[in-house]
Amino acid sequence: MITAAQMRAARALLGIDQRQLADLAGVSVPTIQRMEASADVVRGNVDSLMRLLAALSEAGIEVINEGAVSQDGGRGVRLKASLPENGAPGTYGRGTGSRS
């Protein structure tokens, strides 16, 4: 499956807008808009989802599911499982320990 955040990230990596993604997948722009408005995992017609995934794959996007390993070793994005305790983005790796 694919999440709405992965869809938006995929479009960003490809440098395309919703209309271009709709054209690549052979679906309507409102379909893409509904998919990207999903709270988490994209819900939709199975045929539309399969078209979307095939179009992204053909364009060079590998959808990496939670806990999965990328087989092709290309660049990608993945959200960490949880935010730091304070919930502030951009604070990963900023511990209080000293560096050598």
Image: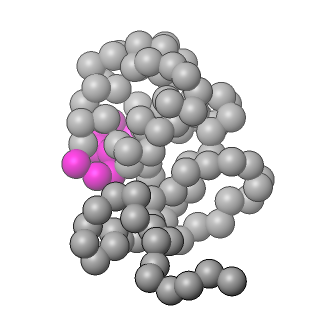
For image coordinates 68% across by 48% down, the residue present is 75
Tell whether position 45 is magenta: yes
Q: Position of residue 43 (x, y in %)?
A: 29, 44
View extreme (right): residue: 72
Determine which quarter of the picture holds residue 73: bottom right
Could you tell me residue 40's position as x and y percent? Answer: 28, 52
Q: Residue at x 46, y 79 (%)?
A: 95
Name the quadrant of the C terminus: bottom right
- Report whether 16 appears left or right of 49: right
Vertical position of residue 84 compared to residue 60: above or below: below
Q: How is the image coloured?
A: one colour
Where does the image place residue 52, in percent across and percent down from the top left? 48, 32
For image coordinates 44% across by 52% down, the residue present is: 1
Residue 39 in sight in this render:
yes
Read off the magenta span. 39-47
Task: Say if the magenta span includes residue 21.
Answer: no
Quadrant of residue 98 in the image?
bottom right
Q: Is residue 61 left or right of residue 6?
A: right
Comparing 6 with 27, the one in front is 6
Which SS does the magenta portion mostly show? loop
Q: Please indicate whether residue 95 sits to the left or right of residue 54 in the image.
A: left
Q: Position of residue 87 (x, y in %)?
A: 26, 67
Is residue 47 visible to the viewer in this orientation of the structure?
no
